[in-house]
Amino acid sequence: MLKRNLLNILIYAFTVEKALQHLFTAIFFIVDFPGIGTPDTGTTFQISNSIMSLLNLVYFTFFIIGIIGKIKKKKWAIRLIIVLACLDIILEFIFHGFFFITVSVIISTILTIISILYLRINKETESIKRS
């Protein structure tokens, strides 16, 4: 039970971090703050800052939906979070190249692993309850 609670806390913490990361990235694509600059979109695609901002806001929204779903104990929520984290990793590699490992990729990887462990422990707990 302690492992499950710890994983649950970590899932919330990392999911909130990913949501805020995408919210701030969306803002930074539109507003030029001195000393921060515009986020790097890589060299693979030429996408306008307004489109990148919109995409980050969509991503932010889906992470928030995942958090709300998790709070309401919806079964789909953890899977949504896993899909978003995996998609974040894939898109980072598509935009920046395979060897461009960022903090975003590391956080998404950690979130994916923690979420899968949570699902596994949750499944084991449910099967023990049924016995």
Image (cartoon, rainbow, N blue to C red):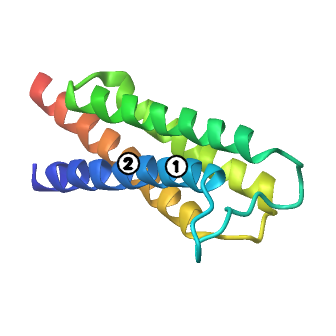
Q: Earlier in the sequence, mark 2 or mark 1?
A: 2
Q: Classify the position of the C terminus by image quarter.
A: top left
Above or below 63: residue 114? below
Q: Secondary structure at mark 1?
A: helix
In the rendered structure, the answer to whether residue 68 lies left or right of residue 3 reads: right
Q: Which mark is residue 15?
A: 2
* Residue type at the position of mark 1: His
Q: Position of residue 2 (x, y in %)?
A: 10, 55
Could you tell me if residue 97 is visible in this image?
yes
The CA span between labels 2 and 1 is 11 Å
Compare residues 26 and 124 and report the one nearer the observer.
26
Identify the image quadrant of residue 100. Answer: bottom right
Above or below 59: residue 86? below
Above or below 27: residue 70? above
Q: Position of residue 5 (x, y in %)?
A: 15, 50
In the rendered structure, the answer to whether residue 5 lies left or right of residue 123 reads: left
Q: Position of residue 40 (x, y in %)?
A: 73, 63
Compare residues 42 and 104 and report the one nearer the observer.
42
In the rendered structure, the answer to whether residue 69 lies left or right of residue 41 reads: left
Q: Which mark is residue 22?
A: 1
Residue at (54% x, 69% y) in the render: 103
Above or below 102: residue 14? above
Residue at (59% x, 42% y) in the render: 56
Compare residues 107 and 124 and report the one nearer the observer.
107
Residue at (43% x, 37% y) in the render: 63
